[in-house]
Image (spheres, rainbow, N blue to C red):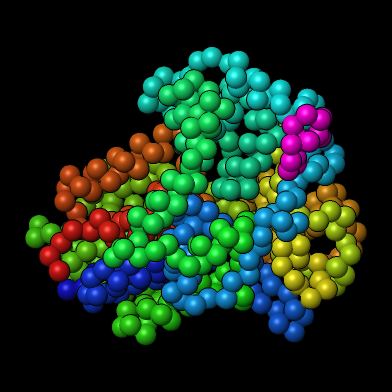
Amino acid sequence: MTIAVLGGGISGLSAGYYLLRRFGKPLTIYEASPRVGGWIRSERHKNQGFLFECGPRTIRPKGLPGANTLELVEELKLPIKAIPSSHVAARNRMLYAKGQICMLPNGPKGLVSVVPPFSKPLYRALIHDLTTNGTVAKNQDESIYSFAERRFGKEIADYAISPMICGICAGDAREISVRFLMETLFEQEQKYGGVLKGMLYARFKDKADKAGAQGLFADGQDEPSLYRQARQEKWAMYGLGDGLEQLPRTLRKYLGERDVNVQLNSKCHNLSFNSDGCAVLSIRDTKVPVSHVVSSLPAYQLAQLTRTQHPSLAAQLLSIPYVDVVVVNMQYDSDQLLQHDGFGLLVPPVENLPVLGIIFDSCCFDMAGNTVITVMMGGRWFDKWFSQQPAVSQKELRDIAQQQVRKILRIKEEPKFSRVHMLHKCIPQYTVGHKRRVEGIRDYIRSYKLPLSLCGAAYDGVGINDVILSARRQVDAVQFTT
């Protein structure tokens, strides 16, 4: 019997890669759609020299997760487009707040002067942390907004943390678990009574990351040469030569050349488990017996497959919420339209606008004389802005995005070319209690001895590095007779 992977997004493909490397057994990846890559989608307009990214566009090379991804990129021989920390796209991060574009501080000067939208120098927030006593109860979770407000004050929570969460997971910081992004700081505060005190102990984190990265690689291998290069050249992030979709496309080709069967248009309709420790998939009205299943599906999709035989597991999976995001790519013929250079800007939720953020793609990568931007809208607030009518049209979404571009960026020209993507339930939300929720799901699988492993954005992090490392760790934990 074969091993089966459900889902042909980057996590599912990565699971296939690590399964092949570890076991070399017959392996099939089942993908419901006619393409691989999931939410990673690149649209190259070669004649005009620009690229639309409809999902993520860059990867961070930091720490163990970054090293792991770079090992995979190196194995696939993919062309890197590095953005060093000195690049304007790495240095300049902005907010749109209080009616203006505000450049976030990127140096010591920003700590001692008043920088909009903040009404006080940022060092005051650090003093607030040093002089604030008390933590939440031990082993409890709290929202990242509550944590930031408690340690640094309301302005930091509203204008620094909240927009950052919008940019990472399109979520509401008042709902997202602090363990999603700041688990180390949260635990240091629990142990030492303050974030700054805890950061003193984290000063050796880079050394720990390096040691951890070395320990991840088997057979005494050194850290990946690309990871070493990224550290030496101080990469802040990187893209790929033909867009990020080049990663899943190349990974599929790599697997196919090594006899991994990637079946497209192959939706799984049911997943059941036999008493002999095997699983049975229902694919195209055919029962497929397999020895083990690795699911990279969204949690709510896996819940539908398991609800008949394991309703309790399905209910736990359904407790992980998701949000809808609208992505609008726009291209203008001139490259002189942006008044500020940088990666882009975020819009704090307190501004009460439908926009989560705007990415300046043509500041990150060469777009051959074009201005290319990506507007992200909706997220946790999608229903508030776009569900007043049965189905908002692509034209209406495009018009709203263009109105916000005129308001925020002062670009009056109409885009020469644009593309609207409605990404339904694309990002899971790590709400308060998420870590314990995921532990409960995996405890259930272990207690019933189900031949099932879970990887992907629903469980161990929503970034590309996170889901690839999640796949690797779950494959490493698979136990059965080969």
40 with respect to 441 (left or right): right
Vertical position of residue 417 compared to residue 157: above or below: below
Could you tell me which residue is drawn at 81 percent across and 67 percent down? 371
Judging depth in this view, the residue of 26 and 384 nearest the camera is 26
Q: Quadrant of residue 391?
A: bottom right
Could you tell me which residue is drawn at 58 percent across and 48 percent down? 168
Note whether residue 375 is visible. Answer: no
Could you tell me which residue is drawn at 30 percent across and 44 percent down? 441
49 with respect to 82 (left or right): right
Judging depth in this view, the residue of 268 and 296 nearest the camera is 296
312 with respect to 416 (left or right): left
Q: Quadrant of the C terminus?
A: bottom left
Where residue 51 appears, as percent x and y from the top left, is 69, 72
Q: Which residues are magenta?
A: 104-117
Judging depth in this view, the residue of 424 and 139 nearest the camera is 139
Helix, strand or loop: magenta stretch: loop
